[in-house]
Image: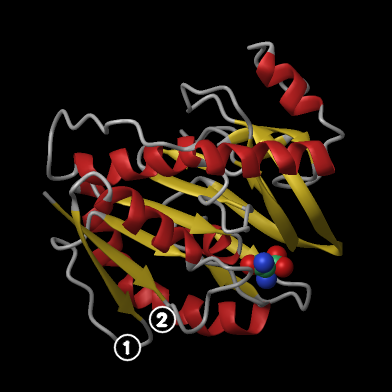
């Protein structure tokens, strides 16, 4: 088995350890005997839509994001074809904004996105910054997804679209600081504001992304569990430190975290 990952704009979109997400996916695949090839693709590079199982985009400041946005539009048809044929996408923060419909910057410029997710983003007049925990209904394991967010953009999921929130905020801001949602998932395309890197302290989400990517070429793959004691300790320490232990206590009792806008 072999997984092909495309890292889009590694030189422009790589804030707060975003590249670490690929290292996590690489290791978790290798520990299960799955070969992995990671290819960086940036400005002006062609992209083979048939080759990749997963596309990854990190976050970036507005200026770098603007440079990447122009080029990303030229790659749009390839990316759409890849997604239609079953490729998965994980996009963080600035990358998340770019796979949505558009991002209107604080300066009023509109950066058109790929529309792979039914979301749009408008810059606000303050930054939504800090540690965040969310509960994700996509994951069988109810333990929260934790990370760090720092964005000026407020993202909204279109009511008529087929996108769902990736999660519901336990603490932190999430998509816009007002509706309690965080990120968006539509088919195999995932966008989120969580840096960190996201996957290092969230093994349940890491394996979910890995499974989505593997499904493109291999049917019925079941990932054998890994020894994730350290990863969960990091997740729990995060909750204890920044969430006053609430998530951890509830997890130990086996109770699904319920403090969300939706719940
Ligand atoms: N420039 C975007 C914003 O501030 C994305 C920032 C990021 O990727 N961290 O909303």
- The image shows residue 163 at horizontal and vertical percentages of 49, 36
Q: Is mark 1 within 8 Å of ligand 1?
A: no
Q: Are marks 1 and 2 in contact (CB under 8 Å)?
A: yes
First in sequence, mark 1 or 2: give its number. Answer: 1
Between residue 44 and residue 229, name the one nearer to us: 229
Callout count: 2
Which residue lies at the image location 34% right of the left edge and 31% below the top edge? 225
Say few, some or many: other residues with alpha carbon within 10 Å of mark 2 (under 14 / 14 to 19 / 20 or more).
some
C-alpha span from label 1 to label 2: 7 Å
Instruction: Tell me if the residue at label 2 has its CB under 8 Å from ligand 1.
Output: no
- Provide the residue designation for mark 1: 44
- Give x and y (percent) for residue 77: 27, 65
Figure quarter occupied by ligand 1: bottom right
Is residue 49 toward the left or the right of residue 250 in the image?
A: left
Which quadrant of the figure has residue 78?
A: bottom left
Whole-percent x, y for residue 202 in the image: 54, 42
User: Which residue is located at x 34 percent, y 60 percent?
Assistant: 55
Q: Which residue is mark 2?
A: 71
Does dot 1 land on a helix, a strand or a loop? loop
**Residue 90, placed above or below residue 203:** below
In the image: residue 213, left or right of residue 233: left
Give the residue drawn at x 47%, y 59%.
21
Q: Mark 1 packing: few (<14 Cα in 10 Å), some, or many (20+)?
A: few
């Amino acid at each position: 088995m072999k997984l092909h990952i495309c890292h889009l704009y590694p030189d422009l979109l790589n804030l707060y350890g975003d590249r670490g997400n690929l290292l996590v996916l690489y290791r978790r695949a290798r520990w299960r005997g799955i070969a992995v090839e990671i290819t960086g693709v940036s400005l002006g590079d062609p992209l083979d839509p048939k080759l990749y199982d997963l596309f990854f985009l990190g976050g970036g400041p507005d200026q770098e994001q603007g440079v990447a946005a122009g080029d990303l539009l030229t790659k749009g048809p390839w990316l759409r074809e890849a997604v239609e044929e079953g490729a998965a996408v994980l996009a963080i923060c600035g990358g998340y904004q770019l796979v949505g419909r558009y991002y209107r910057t604080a300066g009023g410029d509109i950066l058109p996105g790929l529309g792979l997710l039914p979301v749009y983003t408008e810059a606000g007049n303050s930054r939504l910054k800090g540690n965040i925990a969310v509960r994700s209904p996509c994951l069988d394991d109810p333990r929260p997804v934790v990370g760090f967010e720092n964005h000026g953009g407020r993202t909204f999921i279109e009511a008529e679209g087929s996108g769902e929130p990736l999660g519901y905020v336990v603490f932190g801001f999430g998509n816009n600081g007002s509706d309690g949602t965080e990120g968006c998932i539509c088919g195999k395309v995932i966008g989120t504001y969580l840096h960190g890197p996201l996957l290092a302290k969230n093994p349940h989400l890491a394996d979910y992304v890995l499974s989505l990517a593997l499904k493109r070429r291999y049917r019925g793959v079941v990932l054998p569990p890994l020894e994730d004691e350290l990863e969960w300790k990091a997740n729990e320490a995060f909750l204890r430190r920044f969430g006053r232990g609430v998530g951890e206590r509830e997890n130990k009792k086996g109770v699904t975290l319920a403090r969300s806008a939706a719940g």
